[in-house]
């Protein structure tokens, strides 16, 4: 078994890089080969993983040490060389060292890289869903979720200086600024779990592949990460009362209970708009509408340790 450990030396304020020697020792103690691959710039993980998987003897496992964005770049790297959907697709491991760490929380991993590695080394493999999002920026795989409209525009326009000073609250302030603008209407069309078609218009929408969204928010409590579906939330209006209600319900119950929001379980989705609207894939900005999403049921092999439930 051979592992390619990809990490951002700046993740966690440099904490991730400082842990690499200890992680390397743990792999070696377990009798596994590990190759260390630090990234040098945004998007570099895509190149590193793609190049490694095109070798005559590619790694069997891709390890993402960092935040959810690091994992997404690793998935993208595998997809770019056709490895994500091949019969010889690599297995993935996530060692959380980011800010939110949605997938690590989903899998019940400790939110500390060394402890997480100790859990997964002797553990089992779990097959998870992933989705393919195709927008104006091309095709990109994802494991977490996607937002179209308000939250993507807020992330796109947030001040880097404010983000350094405030962290996550900077996005909320940016969203308040965007909130007062007219929101272009989105046309949503989907195919649900029973193969039935549906459609709706909304000024903002998001969907989650995981049972959590943007941390510990839940769109629907009975969602699953291996059922071949994503939970689509369509907002009937974008206003401070609607968003406060949505946030409260998503944090303490489920978004599906909030007024002014409809949540559907879908396996295919198309989003269009009269003017281009920004969107993100796994919290990474990825062009504009039109957007097409297809779910790949249990197509992602993850090293997770003891079986867990979301």
Image: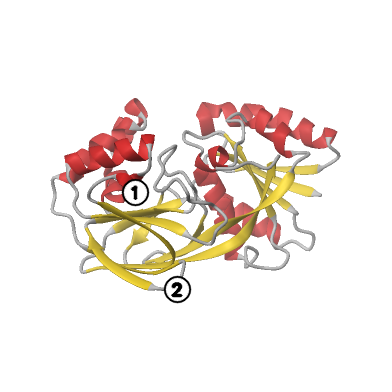
Quarter the C terminus occupies: top right
- Please tell me which of labels 1 and 2 falls first in the chain: 2
For image coordinates 18% across by 39% down, the residue present is 241
Return the x and y of residue 175 as percentages of the image width and height.
24, 41
User: Is residue 108 shown left or right of residue 234?
Assistant: right
Placement of 229 over or under 260, stated as above or below: below
Location of residue 129 (image quadrant): bottom right
Image mark for residue 58: none
Write down the quadrant of residue 188 in the picture. Answer: bottom left
Residue 248 location in percent, x, y? 30, 35
Horizontally, is 26 left or right of 15 in the view? Answer: right
User: Which one is in front, 78 or 250?
Assistant: 250
Residue 228 vertical placement versus 123 (above, below) = below
In the displayed structure, 286 sits above or below 275; it is above
Q: Which residue sits at x=61%, y=60%?
A: 298
Q: Which mark is residue 195?
A: 2
SS at mark 2 in the image = loop
Residue 216 showing in the rendered view:
yes
What is the C-alpha distance between the residues marked 1 and 2? 21 Å
| Residue 159 seen | no
Please name the residue shown 62% across and 52% down the image.
Answer: 48
Task: Tell me: 248 left or right of 40.
Answer: left
Left or right: where 29 falls relative to 296: right
Q: Which mark is residue 256?
A: 1
The residue at 58%/43% (across/down) is: 39
Q: Position of residue 247 (x, y in %)?
A: 30, 38
Please tell me in which quadrant of the rendered image residue 268 appears: bottom left
Q: What SS does tag 1 mark?
A: helix
Q: Residues within 10 Å of mark 2 (few under 14, many from 20)?
A: few
């Amino acid at each position: 078994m051979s592992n390619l450990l990809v990490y951002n030396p700046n993740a966690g304020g440099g904490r991730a890089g400082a842990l690499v020697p200890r992680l390397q020792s743990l792999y070696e103690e377990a009798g596994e080969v590990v190759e260390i691959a630090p990234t040098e710039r945004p998007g570099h993980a895509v190149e590193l993983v793609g190049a490694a998987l095109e070798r005559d003897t590619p790694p069997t496992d891709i390890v993402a040490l960092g935040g959810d964005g690091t994992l997404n770049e690793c998935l993208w790297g595998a997809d770019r060389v056709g490895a994500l959907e091949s019969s010889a697709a690599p297995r993935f491991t996530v060692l959380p060292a980011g800010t939110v760490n949605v997938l690590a929380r989903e899998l019940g991993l400790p939110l500390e890289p060394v402890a997480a590695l100790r859990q997964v080394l002797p553990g089992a493999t779990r097959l998870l869903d992933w989705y393919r999002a195709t927008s104006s920026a091309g095709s990109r795989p994802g494991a977490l979720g996607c937002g179209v409209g308000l939250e993507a525009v807020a992330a796109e326009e947030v001040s880097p200086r404010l983000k350094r000073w405030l962290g996550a609250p900077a996005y909320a302030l940016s969203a308040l600024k965007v909130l007062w603008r007219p929101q272009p209407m989105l046309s949503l069309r989907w195919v649900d779990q029973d193969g039935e078609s549906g459609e709706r218009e909304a000024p903002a929408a998001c969907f989650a592949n995981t049972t959590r969204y943007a941390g510990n928010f839940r769109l629907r409590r009975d969602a699953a990460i291996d059922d071949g579906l994503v939970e689509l939330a369509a907002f009937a209006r974008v206003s401070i009362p609607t968003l406060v209600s949505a946030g409260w319900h998503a944090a303490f119950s489920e978004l599906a209970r909030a007024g002014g929001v409809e949540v559907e379980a879908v396996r295919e989705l198309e989003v269009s708009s009269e003017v281009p609207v920004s969107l993100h894939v796994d919290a990474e900005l990825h062009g504009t509408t039109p957007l097409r999403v297809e779910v790949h049921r249990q197509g992602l092999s993850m090293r997770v340790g003891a079986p867990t439930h979301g």
